[in-house]
Image: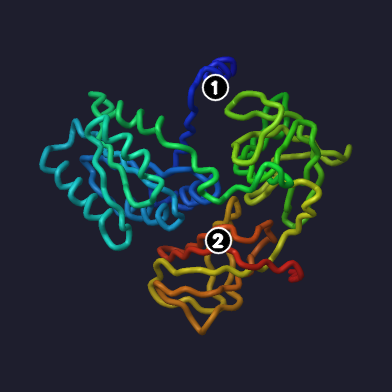
Amino acid sequence: RNSTWSNIVAKSEKVVTFLDLCGHERYLKTTIFGLVGLCPDYAMIVIGANMGIQRMTREHLGIALALRVPVFIVVTKIDIAPENVFRQVMQQLCKLLKSPAAKKMPLVIREDADVEAAASSIASDRVCPIFCVSNVTGEGLPQLRSFLHAISNRQEASGLYRPATEPAEFHIDGVYQVTGVGMVVAGTMKAGTVEDGTQMLLGPDKLGNFRPVLIRSIHSKRVAVNKVVSGQAASFALRAIGKKDQLKRSTFRKGMVLVAKELQPKAVWEFEAEVVILHHATTIKERYQAVIHCGVVRQSAQVKLLTGDLLRTGDKGLIRFRFMYHPEYIALDLPLLFREGRTKGLGRITQVFHDTEE
């Protein structure tokens, strides 16, 4: 299987990675983690032509738009949808995209000529291409494939990555125990360059400490490589430096990173963010609690201070949050999303406080 992958990567003109995120409301936190932590270039929202637009369709579209991830829509199962239902779904979809909340211009792709126009204009954030496909008859699939080939990667435009010349920073989003290899971590390079044999710091653990580890080998797109640079997804086989220090599954938790020693990382309990409240039923005051999504960090936090007495839907303001359980490694200017039930807010980190202990 692995030799097949190296063949595919070597002979492909372009490799597109799909991140399958959940559609069901029960797994919304996983979907938000994917959109915030895995830094996708584009969001593809799949709608069943016979099912129509569900509440979660609006929810996912809203989150993608709030995070400024360019969106395109795939309407599937058009072979089994009755003509009147399909027409109604398309009308609803166009109405939703044109609404003041979305402000998108729907562009239904029917011809090959439309594909080029869609691929060049999706990054401008005004146009939302719509593909109507059937996996049974194959209708619409050639246009979708051409579109995926034509769109460019948004590594520089997204502003989420720092140059490859800076100290290395790797955000972990998956941990595996591989037989004969040991502990393997998967994630995204946010800055710098990492080569095999490099020593890095892994953390923060539950106490906020970092420990030195050695990168034994590197895989990118399932192929062994000698080094990876900022913007690439990769997996590292790790080994602890100390003889008595063993890496176990329990060593790892959500929100951990691998960073270069020269960064001298510190975990923080408190930070300040400039936020806008996207939706909230009542008001947000001091001591309000919500789940914070910031990069690979996912933890409950409490409002310590905020500008004014309270915030309502549509309000902007500065909020000082404190993590409830463990300190986390977060950097300035990172995008942040917080949620609690149907409440959602979006913002950017403006300040971190290193001197606040438990």
Residue at (82%, 44%) from the top-left corner? 212
The picture quadrant where one finds residue 272 is bottom right
Label tally: 2
Vertical placement of residue 103 versus 81, above or below = below
| Label 2: how many Cα within 10 Å (few below 14, some 14–19, many 20+) | many
Q: Residue furthest right?
A: 243
Q: Secondary structure at mark 1?
A: helix
Q: Earlier in the sequence, mark 1 or mark 2?
A: 1
Residue at (43% x, 43% y) in the render = 42
Amino acid type, callout 1: Val
Residue 178 percent location from the top left of the image: 67, 29
SS label for mark 2: strand
Q: In this image, 219 relative to 79: left or right?
A: right
For disc 1, the neighbor class at 10 Å (few under 14, some 14 to 19, many from 20) is: some
Q: Is residue 125 visible?
A: yes
Is disc 1 in contact with disc 2, using a CB cutoff of under 8 Å? no
Q: Looking at the rendered structure, which numbered label has been put on residue 9? A: 1
Residue 180's x, y, as percent? 72, 24
Mark 2 lies on residue:
292
Residue 210: horizontal and vertical position, in percent? 78, 51
Near-viewer residue (171 or 30) = 171
Amino acid at circle 2: Ile
Between label 1 and label 2, give the one nearer the viewer.
1
From this view, report whether residue 24 is shown above or below residue 313: above
Does residue 322 lie above or below 327 as drawn? below
